[in-house]
Amino acid sequence: MLSLKSEFKFCNRGFKDVIVLIPGWATNWRIFDGLELDYNYLLTTKLNTSDFNQQLLSQLEQLKISKVSLLGFSLGGFLAAEFSSSYPDKITQLNLLGVRKCYDSQVLKNIKREILTDARPWIYKFYLNCFSKADKQGLAWFRKNLLKEYLDNLSSAELLRGLDYLASHTLHPEALKEIEDIRIFHGSDDMIAPVKEVLEIKTILPKAKLTLLADTGHLCFLNQNFREMFYHG
């Protein structure tokens, strides 16, 4: 969830490499709680889209990390792509989850209207729509661990700032051609970011590896099969 200033937390998990985890709209760093990847984590604990690049660069310099992998989910994928295109020499691997080229401005305006009217019921439905009907395990984990916390701590102002960011930004795949290792993960039944758009992104980035996770939605990485697909998909 967006903040006035981007902040990060380094988690030394005993691995050699570091991955920056960047959450999406209406989520925060805890969306990655169930993610078990073989990296030390640099968690985005507070997210401000306007200073993200500057604050992440400063954090990497402070930690003396010369190269890093990025994992950006949804809105976080836009930020990960922007940072990677600005600082390609600092990127080991770019992982994009649930991304699309851009969001329809009228759809975003409609969402803003819903949030200004009564945010909680709309966001509740949004979270449910982030899962496919088949992904009962992913939805069950989200319900148990995050749903109530997210609904109880909604900030309409932060949600609106996130929508404004999405309304004014486009993911430019052509700007990522200097990145040697790009991996894209996408749910086959994603209702938030249509598969058609991610296939268009892949066409522009022929060297990128696209993994479609069967029977999953926008939050495909909460599925129990994600780790296996991340390493062997």
Image (cartoon, rainbow, N blue to C red):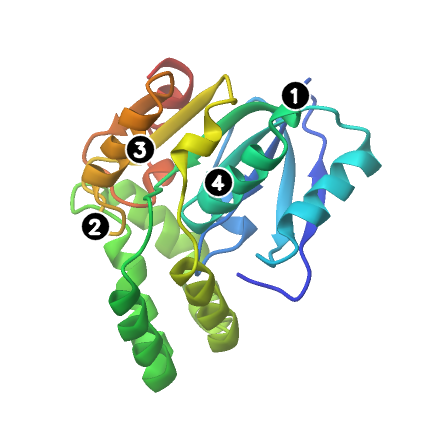
Q: Nearer the viewer, mark 4 or mark 3?
A: 3
Residue 25, label in figure: none
Q: Earlier in the sequence, mark 4 or mark 3?
A: 4
Query: Which quadrant does the C terminus fall into?
Result: top left
Q: Are marks 2 and 3 in contact (CB under 8 Å)?
A: no
* Residue pictured at 51% horizontal, 76% vertical: 157
Q: Secondary structure at mark 2?
A: loop
Local crowd at mark 4 within 10 Å, few (<14), some, or many (≥20)? many
* Residue pictured at 27% horizontal, 47% vertical: 193
- Give the percent coordinates (x, y) of residue 8: 69, 47
Residue pushed farthest front?
174
Q: Earlier in the sequence, mark 2 or mark 3?
A: 2
Instruction: Kindly identify the amino acid type of the residue bearing the numbered disc 4.
Output: Gly
Q: Secondary structure at mark 1?
A: loop
Q: Earlier in the sequence, mark 3 or mark 1?
A: 1
Q: Is residue 96 above or below residue 109?
A: above
Residue 17, label in figure: 1
Q: Earlier in the sequence, mark 2 or mark 4?
A: 4
Q: Is residue 164 above or below residue 145?
A: below
Q: Is residue 225 left or right of residue 150?
A: left
Q: Nearer the viewer, mark 4 or mark 1?
A: 4
Mark 2 and mark 4: span between their CA atoms?
18 Å
* Residue pictured at 47% horizontal, 33% vertical: 175
Badge 3 is on which residue?
A: 201
Badge 4 is on which residue?
A: 72
Mark 4 and mark 1: span between their CA atoms?
17 Å
Residue 191, label in figure: 2
Instruction: Kindly identify the amino acid type of the residue bearing the numbered disc 1.
Output: Asp
Mark 1 and mark 2: span between their CA atoms?
33 Å
Question: Image quarter for residue 11?
Answer: top right
Q: Is residue 28 left or right of residue 45?
A: left
